[in-house]
Image: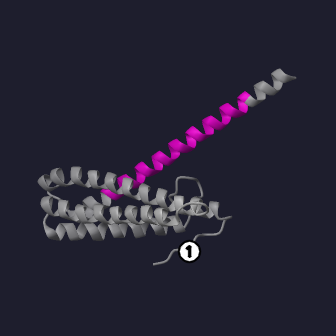
Amino acid sequence: MKKIISVLCALALIGSVTAYAQKKGDKEDWRERIRSQQVAMITSELDLTEAEAQAFWPVYNEVQAQRREAFKASVKALKALKNGVEGKDVNALLDQYEAAKKNCDAVDIQALARYKKVLPAEKVAKLLVAEEKFRHQQIGRLGKGEGGPHPGGPARRTGGKPVPVME
C-alpha cells in the first residue's frame, strides 16, 4: 500500500513539474513573440537607415533590459508594501517604493539622451509614439482575450468576462 502511495505521489510530482515547465516555456514563447512584434512595429514606424539601425538596436535592447530591471524593483517594493505593512516600518517601505519609481523615471530620461546620440530628434519622437502605440495595441488585444501567455487570455482568468479596456 505504501509503495502504491509513493508511486502515485511521484507521478503527481513529475506531472506537476512537467506542467510547470511547459507553462514557463509558453510564457517565454509569448514574451518572445511580443518582443518580435514590438521590433517589427518600431522598425516600420522609424524607417531606420542601415547605419541608424546598427547604432540604435544595441542601445534600445540595453535600455529595455534596464527598464525591465527597474520595473521588477518597483513591483518588488510594491509587494513589500502590500505584504509587510503590519509590524514593519512603513516609512522605510514607502522610501523603497519611491526610490524604485524614481529609478524607473531615471532610466527613461537616460534612455532619451542615449537615443538622441544615435538617432535624429524626429526619429526619437517617432520611437516614443511607436512605443505608446504598441502598448495601446497590446492592451486592446489582451482586453479582448487575445495574445496572453495562456489560452483564453484575461477573459479566462476573470471567469469568462472580458476585461474592459480604457482608451
Q: Is residue 71 above or below residue 164?
A: above
Residue drawn at x 15%, y 64% as measured from the top left: 116
The spot of residue 55 in percent (x, y) is 15, 52
Residue drawn at x 60%, y 69% as measured from the top left: 162
Towards the viewer: 60 or 83 = 83
Q: Residues within 10 Å of mark 1 (few under 14, many from 20)?
A: few
Q: How many numbered marks does the figure carry? A: 1
Q: Quadrant of the N terminus?
A: top right
Secondary structure of the magenta portion, mostly?
helix
Residue occupying the far bottom of the picture: 167
* Magenta stretch in the rendered image: 10-39
Q: Quadrant of residue 47?
A: bottom left
Helix, strand or loop at label 1? It is loop
Query: What residue is pinned by disc 1?
Result: 164
Q: Quadrant of residue 144?
A: bottom right
Horizontal side, residue 153 vs residue 131: left or right:
right
Magenta stretch containing residue 16, yes or no?
yes
The spot of residue 141 in percent (x, y) is 49, 65
Q: Is residue 56 above or below residue 101?
A: above
Magenta stretch containing residue 18, yes or no?
yes
Q: Please, which colouring scheme is shown?
A: one colour
The spot of residue 118 in percent (x, y) is 14, 58
The spot of residue 23 in percent (x, y) is 57, 44
Residue drawn at x 59%, y 41% as measured from the top left: 20
Towards the viewer: 146 or 18 = 18
